[in-house]
Image (cartoon, grey):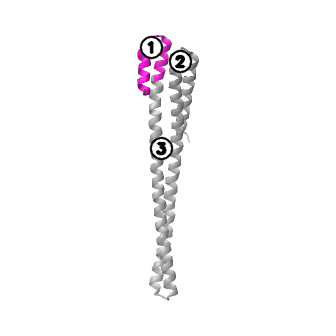
Amino acid sequence: MPVNEEVEEHVHHAHDPFDKTVAGSMAIIAALLAVVSVLGQHFQAEELLNQQKASDQWAFYQAKDIRRYSAQVAQDTFTQLKGDAASVSRYAQDEKRYAKQRADIEEHAREFERERDQSAHKAVRFHVGEVFLELAIVLSSLSILMKQKLFFMAGAGAALIGVVISATAFVA
């Protein structure tokens, strides 16, 4: 049974003030769980997107390196064959240009990797927070079923831990 349906069922059947308090708390926890879950998925998608961008940049880097190497080979060949100076110079300039472009591309790739790592950190925090919020709903459900305040307190503690861990995603 989905979490929302379970919460609605508990609220509907709650007659005891304790049951109403727990059911209301469960509704709040379920809302927090939904937010944390969506944020976790968002940052995981960002992580994958940045990984793809970094991979594209590294492929571009390799293409420029192949062009640089080809220019270097052409320059060496023309030099050995005593080719005209204009051709040798042109390939020398190409080699320098490709080397500079590679450095720029490398910096872009590393930036995407840094962004990927930041998104991954946030996604993990939200996923761990999600686990604690789910645990809070389960413990709260048990408190209604077993009429045990201890389970409700444990659930509230788990919810608090989940919210704090999720909030730390924005700190680092």
Q: Position of residue 63 (x, y in %)?
A: 46, 67
Does label 3 or label 2 sit earlier along the sequence?
A: 3
Q: Are marks 3 and 1 in contact (CB under 8 Å)?
A: no
**Magenta range:** 2-26
- Identify the residue at image location x=50%, y=69%: 99
Q: Secondary structure at mark 1?
A: loop
Indicate which label's residue lies in the foreground, 3 or 2: 2
- Identify the residue at image location x=46%, y=27%: 30
For disc 1, the marked residue is 14
Does label 1 or label 2 sit earlier along the sequence?
A: 1
Q: Position of residue 67 (x, y in %)?
A: 46, 71
Q: Position of residue 151 (x, y in %)?
A: 56, 20
- Identify the residue at image location x=46%, y=35%: 37
Amino acid type at mark 1: Ala
Q: Is residue 4 left or right of residue 77?
A: left
Q: Residue furthest bottom?
A: 82
Q: From where the camera sits, is residue 97 visible? A: no
Q: Secondary structure at mark 2?
A: helix
Instruction: Please tell me whether residue 14 belongs to the stretch shown in magenta.
Output: yes
Gap between marks 3 and 1 measured at Cα: 37 Å
Q: From where the camera sits, is residue 113 visible? A: yes
Residue nearest the observer in this picture, 51 or 96: 51
Instruction: Please tell me whether residue 66 belongs to the stretch shown in magenta.
Output: no
Q: Quadrant of residue 27?
A: top left
Amino acid type at mark 2: Ser
Q: Residues within 10 Å of mark 2 (few under 14, many from 20)?
A: many
For disc 3, the marked residue is 44
Does label 3 or label 1 sit earlier along the sequence?
A: 1
For disc 2, the marked residue is 143
Q: Residues within 10 Å of mark 3 (few under 14, many from 20)?
A: many
- Identify the residue at image location x=47%, y=68%: 64
Q: Residue furthest top?
A: 16
